[in-house]
Image (cartoon, rainbow, N blue to C red):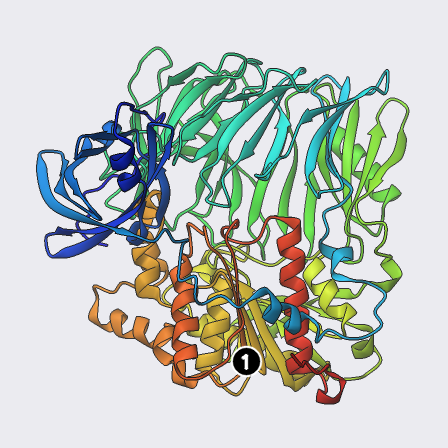
Amino acid sequence: MKNKFLKLSSVLLISVFSGVSGIRAQELEGSWEGKLSVQGTELPLKFDISRENDSFSGTMDSPLQGAFGLLLDKVELEDDQVTLSYSQIGATYTGSLSGETITGTFRQSGQEFPLILKKVEKTVPGDPALPSSEKELEQLAAYDQGKYKYEVEDYFAKPKASSFQFSPDGKYMSYREKDENAKNHVYVKNLKTNEITRAIEEKEELVRGYGWANEDRLLYVMDKGGNENYHLYAADVDGSNTMDLTPFEGVQTQILDLLKDDKNHVIVSMNKENAQVFEPYKVNIETGEITRLYSNEDIANPIMNYLFDKDGALRGFVRLREGVNMDLYYKKNSESDEFEVVKQINWKDTFNPSLNYATEYPHDAYVVSNLETDKNTVYLYDLKEDKVIKKLFSNDNYDISGVSLSRNRNYELDYYTFQGEKREIVPVSDYYKKLHKRITQKFPDKQYSIADKTDDESKYLIFLQSDKLYGEYWSYDVAADKFELLYNLMPQLKAEDMAEMRPITFKSRDGKTIHGYITLPKAALEGKKVPVIVNPHGGPQGIRDTWGFNPEAQLFASRGYATLQVNFRISGGYGREFMESGFKQIGRKAMDDVEDGLQYVIDQGWVDPDKAAIYGGSHGGYAVLRGLTKTPDLYAAGVDYVGVSNIFTFMETIPPYWKPYEKILREIWYDENIPEERAIIEEVSPVFHIDKIKKPLLVVQGANDPRVNIDESDQIVRALRAKGVDVPYMVKYDEGHGFGKEENRIYLYKAMLGFYAKHLKDQELQPEFRD
């Protein structure tokens, strides 16, 4: 929204106050709503106040800004005078309590705004009257009838063990193991004594990821209910000395650098001072001491990325200028505090440097760039002089995604990677050429990646996968030249029962070469035309589907459905021109490519054109709704998973830390301030074309989603229900942008299979329901 003055930032703690009367305390408890009028724009605010004994705490929601559950640092009641404040941003609300009304003033930065709060019944995000009941969703799931070898749990229950890692010195191996309550704790095994201890306990909130900080300490991240405000935690290998290193509510933490040469510190970025921008902090993982390394104070032209060297010194940063330009600042003199602009580029340009420590010259870097070519290319670069030293590697058809260096061998360049039809590794160093040859000879029909290695490179963890193998961890002892199978993540899924994922290439209606994948069930290979699930990916910009084991596609194949994945224009990995050709084409030519892909697989004789469903998440969910309105007769059914329904409201409810990118978002999607593009938004926003939807739709949403607000799903369900359409609607109030909890994922896919069975399979095979 325009003219926002609230800087939604969190605070360090909740202050509590005592000495209030019991009657007044009861009156203040509860939920309060009001609207600020700011230059003609109404900004709804909601406060939830709770009490324990005579102490208050509270949270604030600002739905239009996509901010929920932000903790107040002051909740005070003196007689009938109420004070609520965010001291970090200088915002305070004071008012007089009278029954179910608080009449007062909101103050910030010298401005004052009248605000009347009314007491309301406490609610959850979105409209709680809209979601379908558990009984209705269970009845939907029951349509998935038949004798199948594999159930949903076989594909979507988390592995019994996963996420294997070595400690840096190779003394320990860590891994996640699931208990009887589907909680995935982190265990540490002493490889010499075989003693096992639980280092990290997963409780109500998911441990979203973990890793080794040094030989004796682990790091892990958690948020609350999928809100993506990640906290960084640390724990010793025996589970002791557990600590929240970033104990700030409403703040997102991102790890920037693990500082392998400084075992007691990591560098993180946090939007602690202002919710819209991130600043770098050095965190002591033993004591929790935090030091800010650089101030990101120019909110109009904020710093977006930081470049630190291996010793933790800030060498450069990228500043966003005028919302769409990127200026690379670099410290040419290590003795100076001055950063100079060495390159000015547009946000569409790629210029990603990583410092090269293999030479004596301190300004050498490896740079992945598309400034000179359509495809991302690797260069040896002089950052001080801003010039190419040498072109190192490129591919004619695909973007190079990165380079890998060996810290153990003085940062020798080991290999390049890129995504072609499959993931490709191009060895460079003599050492890695031998290792690559040894691994590929041992596993010739698998795709591998180095999951981990010890600091001295004496032991490797190798992760193997294929289109029919979910994943295996193997260890490799270099000195003994010995491979050992550590763990098969999904041993119940037999490769001979899995479906093949085939790369496909076709021409779009305007002559563009488009790539993708088709996963075909056994019946299709035998010549039968099968139902197909068209699955556009999320993003959409810069994202692409890849070859490998896809549990969704394999689950669908087990029920006789093919899965089509199209890397439509705007997808990443195919060069700059291909990606940019999809800008301002979301819901238009990008959608045409998906339709052309469906026509291609129909022409091959693989799928039944009358039984094509469309399913996707995020942008893919938008594509579902757009497909059902753009081509109402093409699809037999659709499943919208956390998808955008209204581009106007989507732009208004982006999380605050996306705000600096708003101009870029409008260059990728559409800008409502340009009349002709505003008309396009109305054309391609499904919520304005409800009358065109005539095929069945299942809608799925996480209530705490900070990216695609629950209102996006509520809008489409409410509008369809108003015209008498039965739309099953699944909402999980402990999830965000996609379901992370095992029980919720299983619940989702069971309902989805029932929905497909109901609308894609023969009617006589469907069960009947009676109350």
Percent coordinates x, y for residue 596 in the rendering: 56, 78
Q: Is residue 611 above or below residue 55?
A: below
User: What amino acid is labelled 1 in the image?
Assistant: Pro
The answer to whether residue 25 is left or right of residue 760 is left
Q: Is residue 369 above or below residue 246?
A: below
Q: Which residue is mark 1?
A: 696
The answer to whether residue 204 is left or right of residue 769 is left
Percent coordinates x, y for residue 540 in the rendering: 47, 59
Q: Nearer the viewer, residue 358 or 565?
A: 565
Q: Residue at x 49, y 18 (%)?
A: 361
Q: Residue at x 72, y 68 (%)?
A: 556
Residue 507's image quarter?
bottom right
Q: Quadrant of the C terminus?
A: bottom right
Count of numbered marks: 1
Q: Nearer the viewer, residue 186 or 732?
A: 732
Q: Is residue 638 visible from the viewing direction of this image?
A: yes
Percent coordinates x, y for residue 586 in the rendering: 41, 68
The answer to whether residue 298 is left or right of residue 386 is left
The answer to whether residue 223 is left or right of residue 118 is right
Q: Residue at x 42, y 78 (%)?
A: 720
Q: Residues within 10 Å of mark 1 (few under 14, many from 20)?
A: many
Q: Nearer the viewer, residue 438 or 645?
A: 645
Q: Quadrant of the N terminus?
A: bottom left
Residue 138's image quarter?
bottom right
Q: Is residue 551 above or below residue 108?
A: below
Q: Is residue 420 visible from the viewing direction of this image?
A: no
Secondary structure, mark 1, is loop
Percent coordinates x, y for residue 79 in the rendering: 17, 30
Q: Nearer the viewer, residue 365 or 482?
A: 482
